[in-house]
Image (cartoon, helix red, strand yellow):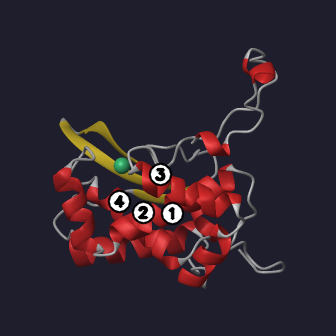
Amino acid sequence: MRLLRRGDTPAHRYNGAMRPKPPPDYLAGYPPALVAQVNALIAQDQLGTVLRQRYPVAHTVRTDKALYDYVVALKHTHLRTAPPLSKVAFDSKLQVIAHALGTHTAISRVHGGKLKAKREIRVATVFRDMPPEFLRMIVVHELAHLRVRNHDKAFYQLCCHMEPAYPQYELDLRAYLCLLGAGGAPLWAAQPGSVD
Ligand SMILES: [Zn+2]
């Protein structure tokens, strides 16, 4: 994402200590023309307007309990037979990086001689202040990992089965993360005075 890098001049390039870290390349793997389009919208200060028109409202899933209920309801609809979840939470320590938008872990523990897997889904706190479509996208993504470990064709087919607009939501979410990475202000920040 070269257009988003700051301080990327020869003078800075050889001064590793002073150079600001470039934002992660959230659009790695997308067609170059599409990446260029996103970068152009950011450079013209238009991406925020486009995203807010497409996704006008923030979701209302504010607490870990609300997130748990949301995830379990979605799982019940689409992945009823997948193993149960022991924990679902927003995680403020989770850094959203290019290839991991959330985390899913399966911790194996021995219980009375039997190996039991505890499954947890953690969603980065940045998803608290997002439109419902982006929350749905990340939850669908993590739920799909209950069945498919890798980001392969079967994985994305499962995501699209749960949310047909999944590819569009993922692209738009990644574009938004690029905007934040370039120093843009959050578009769906909670209203001052709202109760969490
Ligand atoms: Zn994944």
Instruction: Check mark 3 vs ligand 1: CB closer than 8 Å? yes or no.
Output: yes
The reply to whether callout 4 and callout 2 are in contact (CB within 8 Å) is yes
The reply to whether callout 3 and callout 1 are in contact (CB within 8 Å) is yes
* Amino acid on which the number 2 mark rests in the picture: Glu
Residue 185: % across, % down: 76, 63
Per the image, the residue denoted by label 4 is 141
Identity of the residue drawn at 78% across and 33% down: 7
* Amino acid on which the number 4 mark rests in the picture: His
The reply to whether callout 2 and callout 1 are in contact (CB within 8 Å) is yes
Image quarter hosting the C terminus: bottom right
Residue 183: % across, % down: 75, 53
Of residues 108 and 165, which is closer to you in this image?
165
Per the image, the residue denoted by label 1 is 173
- For residue 170, which numbered disc appears in the image? 2
* Amino acid on which the number 3 mark rests in the picture: Leu
Mark 4 residue element: helix
Mark in the foreground, 4 or 1: 1
CA–CA distance in space, label 4 to label 2: 9 Å
Left or right: 86, with 172 as reference point? left
Identity of the residue drawn at 62% across and 79% down: 52
The quarter of the displayed image where residue 42 is located: bottom right
- For residue 40, which numbered disc appears in the image? none
The reply to whether callout 3 and callout 2 are in contact (CB within 8 Å) is no
Instruction: Check mark 2 vs ligand 1: CB closer than 8 Å? yes or no.
Output: no
* Amino acid on which the number 1 mark rests in the picture: Leu
Left or right: 108, with 39 as reference point? left
Per the image, the residue denoted by label 3 is 101
Identity of the residue drawn at 69% across and 71% down: 187
